[in-house]
Each structure stands twice: as structure tokens, then as C-alpha cells.
Image (cartoon, helix red, strand yellow):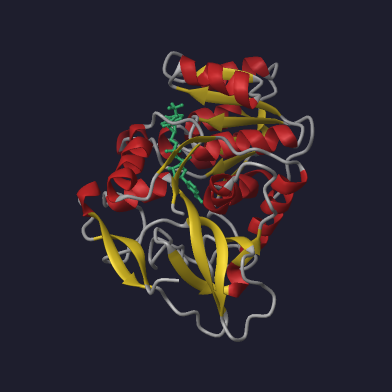
Amino acid sequence: MTDQHTVYRLSHRKDFSGITAHQEDIPTPQPHEVLIQVRNVALNYRDISIATSRYVSPVKENLIPCSDLAGSIAALGSAVTDFSLGDRVVAAFDPTILYGPRQGLGAGLGGMVDGVLRAFVALPSTCVVRIPEDEGEQRWGEWASLVCTGVTAWNALFGNVPLMPGQSVLCQGTGGVSITALVFAKAAGATVIVTSSSDEKLEMVKRRFGADHTVNYETSPDWAEDALRITKGRGVDFVIENCGSGTISQSLKAVAYGGIVACIGFLSPAKQEDMPDVAKLALLKGAVVRGIQVGSKQMLEDVVRFVAARNLRIPIDREFGFSREEVVRAYEYVRSGKHVGKVCIKVS
Ligand SMILES: NC(=O)c1ccc[n+]([C@@H]2O[C@H](COP(=O)([O-])OP(=O)(O)OC[C@H]3O[C@@H](n4cnc5c(N)ncnc54)[C@H](OP(=O)(O)O)[C@@H]3O)[C@@H](O)[C@H]2O)c1
């Protein structure tokens, strides 16, 4: 093993020109850490907002970005007994949250603390989860995608009152969270409605990923009405609310009495003067409006088991290389919103 490896840092956060490559020493694992050779990093919308100073939480200066890795164990700390060299692993989004709800803003990788966009990373072995061997093609990107997006979708659907077979789910948009929730909900026997601004993307999610119904939210701005029509007036049991205050009125119109609106994202904030009265809308529906903060290591174990047991495939739109040019292209691609599902970086 060479002594140095490639590490990306955000030297500033005005735009993607702040993404800079460095050669740094490969860390030596502390007694309770493992050194992971990073194979693949999955990007999230969060990484775009962090690199452009639009993230909702504080961010470390000169940050190593990104939270989602899949890789293999390259070295073991002296006190680590439950992993072996070469084990294939993923690591929890926030290494400090092993179970239960996240406390405060926590220590999500690639936010307040350095993340995983590097060739090697040392992490506490307690936050690491083994993944199974892939049959045939390597699926590192799919496993990496479970870390933030997968756990978030799992938490939204199964983390409180769990989704039941025969229920219905509405997923907003065709990005990572929405399409991963579509895959999980279909595997759990639900009927799924997907919304998008693009008819082409809607055609794809129906044909390739099994969406039962689709609605174009641009041409049908009152898409809750479509959801009510599709569910014969009953409403949907779960809404994957990716967009925030700009869409929550429609979500609360679309949700069934007693249903759950899982508040995940903030892609479409309302103007101050248009802020909906969420308390009143939720009360009238007896609905649960539930904030999601990714999830714990325990949820990552649950989601890895689910994906492995059902051999689920996580839709990866595109994988980019690890050169600086390719990394910047990957960021630009996510920002463009052209993707359906996940966008990843092949590290090694
Ligand atoms: N709370 C958490 O724990 C957590 C975890 C993960 C992500 N998030 C947040 O969840 C959101 C989605 O993340 P992501 O990684 O899935 O993003 P992404 O992959 O970049 O997906 C973005 C997609 O959202 C859709 N979209 C944008 N505005 C919309 C609107 N008004 N109505 C419906 N769809 C809309 C677009 O789909 P179309 O092109 O099809 O229109 C767009 O392609 C982000 O805000 C992210 O920060 C939160």
C-alpha cells in the first residue's frame, strides 16, 4: 500500500471550483477503528447544497465532502475483532447515532465532520455494516446509495408506523430518495404514485422501476387531486415529501385520513406570504407530519438486510470517475436534475 492517497476538499463553498484534490497521508486506524478502502461514493442533493453554501446546517471549513461510501476493509485497529481484512462494508451516515433518533444536528459525515470523498477513510468499527458479496457485476454504487438515501427512505416508510402491503405511497420527483422509496415500497407490496416535471422520466419510472401511477406536477399543479382520483377519494397512506413548504399543502391534501407525510427535503420552499397552515391541515386529516433525519446505524443494518434478502436493485443513473474533472462533472450532473435515481463516483 502507498503511504499517500487522493482526498477531495472544499477549499471554498461559493461554487464547484472549490472542489480541490490533494495528496495526503493514509490514516492509521486507532485501536477501535477500521481503515476502509473506498470503492464508491454516492452523491446526494445535500452534497450540492454544501458545496454551494446553501445547506441548512453549519459546515466545517476545508471539508472533505460526501457521506455515502461502500468499500472494503484495508486495515484493522488493534482492538477490532469483529471484522476481517477484505470485508465489504458501508458505514453509517452519522457514526455517533447507532440506534434511535438523531440527537440535534449530530455529526453527519461530510457536513460538520470530514466525509468520505477520498481513497481511504478510518472510521470507528461500531458504525460499520457488512454488505454481502455481489453475484456477477460489482454493485458498490448501489450499496453506497443505501447510506443516506436508503436509510432515509427506509425511515420514512418503516421507521414509525410501518407501511403495510396494500397501502399506497406517493413519491415526489425522480431523484434518489424518491426512486429508492419507490423500490422499497413496491417490494413491500404497496401501490406507488410518482410525480415529476418530466413525462419522459415518468414513462421511465413506470416502465423500468414499476411505478403504478404517475403525475406530471408541472402540467398538473393540483397533483393532490390526481392522487385522490387514483386512490378513489381515499388519499395516499404515505407521502415522501421531498420539497418542503412549497408542496406540503398538496401533500396534506393528497394524504389519507390518519396517513403519514414524511418531511424529508426542501427542494421547493414556499414564499413567506404563501406559508401553509400545516397545523390546521394536519389536524383536519388526523395526519402525522413526521420529520426525517436520515436514520441510525441500526436502520442501515435493516435496510442492507432488506435489499440483500429481496435482491433489490437501486437505480443508478450514472457513475463518474475519481479524477477532479469527473468529480466536478458528477456534482454538475446532480445539480442539473437530469438524473433518475442515484449518481455515484467510482473511486477504486
Ligand atoms: N431529511 C433527510 O434525512 C434527508 C435525506 C436525504 C435527502 N434529503 C433531502 O431530500 C431532498 C431530495 O434529495 P435527493 O438526494 O433525492 O435529491 P435529487 O436526487 O437531487 O432529486 C431532486 C429531484 O427532485 C424533484 N423535484 C424538484 N422540485 C420538485 C417539486 N416541486 N415537486 C416534486 N419533485 C420535485 C426533481 O424531480 P423531477 O426532475 O422528476 O421533476 C429532481 O430531479 C433534498 O432536499 C435533500 O436535501 C433529506
Can residue 258 be seen by looking at this rendering? no
Q: Is residue 324 left or right of residue 34?
A: left
Q: Which residue sits at x=40%, y=38%? A: 267
Q: How many marks?
A: 0
Residue 140 picture location, percent across and down: 56, 49
Q: Which residue sits at x=32%, y=50%? A: 323
Hey, which quadrant is residue 21 in on the image?
bottom left
The relative height of residue 110 versus residue 144 in the rendered view (above or below) is: below
Can residue 207 be seen by looking at this rendering? yes
Q: Is residue 21 or residue 127 the one in the foreground? A: 21
Residue 126 picture location, percent across and down: 61, 73
Q: Is residue 182 or residue 115 the one in the foreground? A: 115
- Ligand 1 is found in the corner quadrant, namely top left
The relative height of residue 308 versus residue 341 in the rendered view (above or below) is: below
Q: Is residue 286 or residue 141 the one in the foreground? A: 141
Q: Which residue sits at x=26%, y=49%? A: 52
Residue 222 picture location, percent across and down: 48, 18
Hey, which quadrant is residue 124 in on the image?
bottom right
Q: Is residue 206 or residue 316 the one in the foreground? A: 316
Residue 13 picture location, percent across and down: 23, 54
In the picture, which quadrant includes the N terminus?
A: bottom left
The single residue placed furthest to the front in the displayed view is 1
The relative height of residue 177 versus residue 89 in the rendered view (above or below) is: above
The relative height of residue 235 versus residue 37 in the rendered view (above or below) is: above
